[in-house]
Amino acid sequence: MKILVPVKRVLDYNIKARAKADGLGVELAGLKMAMNPFDEIALEEALRLKERGAATEVIAVSCGAIACQDTLRTALALGADRAILVSTECELQPLAVAKLLRVLVNREEAGLVICGKQAIDDDAGQTGQILAALLGWSQATFASQVTLEANHATVTREIDGGLETIVVQMPAVITTDLRLNEPRYATLPNIMKAKKKPLETVTPDALNVDIAPRLMLIKVVEPPARVAGIRVATVAELVDKLKNEARVI
Amino acid sequence: MTILVIAEHDHRHLKSATRHVLSAAHAVGGDVHILVAGHSCSPAAEAARTLPGVTQVLLADHVSLTADGAENLGHLVLRLAPSYTHILSASSAVGKSFMPRVAALLDVAQISDIVRVDATDTFTRPIYAGALWATVHTQDPIKVVTVRVTAFEACAETGGHAALTPIPEVAESGLSTRQSIALSVSTRPELEGARVVVSGGRGLGSAERYKELLEPLADKLQAALGASRAAVDLGYVPNDYQVGQTGKIVAPDLYIAVGISGAIQHLAGMKSARVIVAINSDPEAAIFTVADYGLVADLNSAVPELTAAL
Ligand SMILES: Cc1cc2nc3c(=O)[nH]c(=O)nc-3n(C[C@H](O)[C@H](O)[C@H](O)COP(=O)(O)OP(=O)(O)OC[C@H]3O[C@@H](n4cnc5c(N)ncnc54)[C@H](O)[C@@H]3O)c2cc1C
């Protein structure tokens, strides 16, 4: 069975995002980019399944600008067998990405897709579920544990108020939560080896997918900031402020 | 305009999240219907009938909806969708799971986690862990929207008398079944609706210290307990305690952050609290930039002292 893992190139999580001066986008020029952390977890899970013999091949896919090649090289260095870049300079929204992935899933005859539960840039949290619906597949979101059997997967999910374990029919889309695993690091020899692994480039046109954005961005702004408060010197002062100034206790 | 609000419930009781989402629906304006989809969930549907400004409650009561599975729920909502201009749900674990399936099969763009209704077709939502807010416009004929519950006040519980319309058939996809569910049992208020939240981070040092120090404080304040990702990853508390970009979003009257540094991912989940208190030994900690009251102190002495003083 082949596992397809979509990986997104996003602003590094340590960097605070700022709006462009014209308010019509997010300033990314010259800033450090990285693989979306949830996708690292997804890739790690796919690699572990392959190492356990539950999968034959792990294919990493990224959709976006040429620079997404870097993200794919990282995925290859971590252990993906090959990579596909769906190359476009156009803005991609989750629905379009899911449609691109659907075509690749069918072309590759993948039996499982593991993706991050959300990308830390747009925080939309949709792509995996959209893909599952478009394919008519089952889904398991927010996975914290995955066990594969012949024709089903048992997945423990982080839900509001606790944990739920579900059994989904294969093929399926699984989206990863933070505690599914701890991703490995790429070693230098593997980074060298990754340069020789296959990286195919295709275009949305070649896949016959309409990627036109549906949502029009009106503006991006910083939300109302909190006014900085004060320092209290003692616990007694804190209690006094909470009682008599803030009146919250 | 006719809006379908998907109720949040535990099959018996309507959850307060429903009333927040209803406020968002009222901000859009128009006729509002509520769907209560579940199994043996007529008490929740009865409660929904009294919510203000709702003309119809649709009740889909079927065994295939027992486990809130996204495939069955998505399919049901998809079937109802053509009668509506907007479909709104909470951005809860359930809402986040089934709503994108509905949007996908309607071939429309879902708008996730809105914090403001700017117009019937224009909404504002946080991006980049809430560091920025994006206002987006859609021309899709049906707007599929998930709502950040803390960004909208809850409407009243009573005042309406909606008609009840049963939905007879519900399909079973056979794609997914629930094997087990383990919900944390607690006598404390729910994290997301609590008036006071006491939250602990890596600074607590261990699960034992978290319990010893924060539980008595939370008891005194009748507070819910929360945590940073680090505290969850280290096993101090279960995963559903996590507050932040990728955990729960809370907006209590009072949020007390103990031994939490204030990473942007954490701030994303709590910076809408009315009053924030930070207790941290590092005067440079980022949490102090959002705290109304900052106490630079060792939590091991400050927290018991605070608990005793209340
Ligand atoms: C994809 C992704 C998603 C994430 N999502 C979330 C999320 O949803 N929520 C979240 O919280 N984080 C999230 N994080 C993690 C986040 O980046 C931080 O790592 C995390 O919030 C840090 O937790 P902390 O403040 O408890 O730990 P630390 O940053 O280690 O801070 C511990 C604090 O305790 C203080 N301290 C230590 N000892 C004492 C003492 N004796 N007395 C007083 N103070 C003391 C220290 O001064 C320090 O400020 C995410 C990260 C990533 C990459």
Image (spheres, coloured by chain):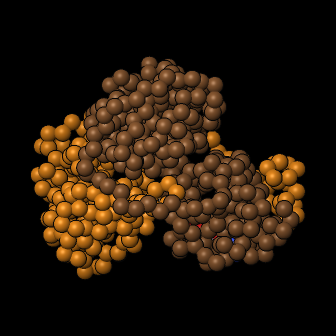
Chain colours: A orange, B brown
User: Depth check: B43 or A7 in front?
Assistant: B43
Residue A136: x and y in percent read 22, 45
Occupied quadrant, residue A168: bottom left
Image point 36% across, 61% down: which residue? B179
Left or right placement of residue B235 versus residue A73 in this view: right
Front residue of B226/A163: it is A163
From where the camera sits, is residue A30 visible?
no
- In the displayed structure, A231 sits above or below B48; it is below
Task: Please indicate, yes or no, whether residue A179 appears anywhere in the rendered image.
Answer: yes
Q: Quick one: quadrant of the N terminus of chain A?
A: bottom left
State the residue at coordinates (16%, 63%): A2
Where residue B86 appears, x then y in whole percent?
42, 28
Q: Is residue B304 left or right of residue A15?
A: right
Residue at the location (58% across, 29% down)? Answer: B51
- B159 or B305: which is nearer to us? B159
A85 vs A9, left or right, is left
Picture coordinates of residue A237 (x, y %)? Answer: 87, 61
Q: Position of residue A43 (x, y in %)?
A: 29, 65
Q: Quadrant of ligand 1?
A: bottom right
Lateral position of residue A48 relative to residue B272, left or right: left
Count of numbered labels shown in the rendering? 0
Taking depth in this image into account, of B126 and A142 the one nearest to the observer is: A142
Q: Is residue B26 above or below residue A110?
A: above
- Give the residue drawn at x 55%, y 43%: B13
Instruction: Work out whether A97 lies above or below A84.
Output: above
